[in-house]
Amino acid sequence: MIWLTIFAMTLIIFTSRYLFLDPRLPVKLNAQTQRFLSYSSPAVLTTIWVPIVFLPEKNTINITFSNPYLIGAVIAVLIAMKTKNVLLTALVSMVVFFCVSFYLK
């Protein structure tokens, strides 16, 4: 049963992506729909990172300097704002995260 569910989900995702990515297909979205869909990526990314950064222990909000996830996220935001370089932001914030994690243990 699980394989059928995985196959169905794969088929739905592939079909929805293929309809909009293949230039030979006549499916086009109007400007209002494109603008509406432009908010989906930031919304999905926010739902992924917020629990990781603010709830590292289950059901406990941790907004202190002893939270390496929060420190890494703040550093990532500052570097991203300053340099606008994705690779540099990811590498430096990961190094800071691992250093803080190692230091706090």
Image (cartoon, helix red, strand yellow):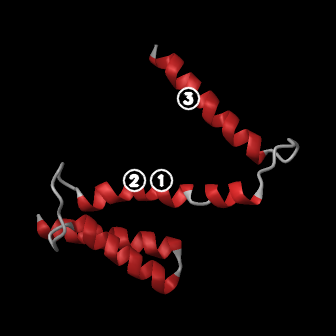
Judge left or right: residue 21 versus residue 44. right
Horizontal side of 70 relative to 94 (left or right) equals left
Q: Which residue is mark 2?
A: 48
| Disc 3 and disc 2 in contact, CB within 8 angstroms | no
Q: Amino acid at mark 1?
A: Val
Q: Residue 40: where, in percent of width, then height?
A: 55, 55
* Residue 34 lies in quadrant: bottom right
Q: On residue 44, which mark appears?
A: 1
Q: Is residue 20 above or below residue 70?
A: above
Q: Secondary structure at mark 2?
A: helix
Looking at the rendered structure, the secondary structure element under dot 3 is helix
Label whose residue precedes the other's in the sequence (1 or 3): 3
Residue 101 at x, y percent in the picture: 20, 65
- Label 3 neighbourhood size at 10 Å, few (<14), some (14-19), many (20+)? few
* CA distance for labels 3 and 2: 20 Å
Q: Residue furthest front?
A: 32
Mark positioned earlier in the residue sequence (3 or 2): 3
Q: CA distance from mark 2 to mark 1?
A: 6 Å
For image coordinates 82% across by 44% down, the residue present is 27
Mark-to-mark CA distance, 1 and 3: 18 Å
Q: Quadrant of the C terminus?
A: bottom left
x, y (%) of residue 45? 46, 57
Where residue 9 is drawn, which disc sits there?
3
| Residue at the (45%, 18%) spot, across then down | 2
Residue 10 appears left or right of 99? right
**Looking at the image, which residue sits at the far top?**
1
Using the image as rendered, state which of residue 9 and residue 91 is in the foreground.
9
Query: CB atoms at circles 2 and 1 under 8 Å apart?
Result: yes
The residue lying toward the viewer, choosing from 87 and 38, is: 38
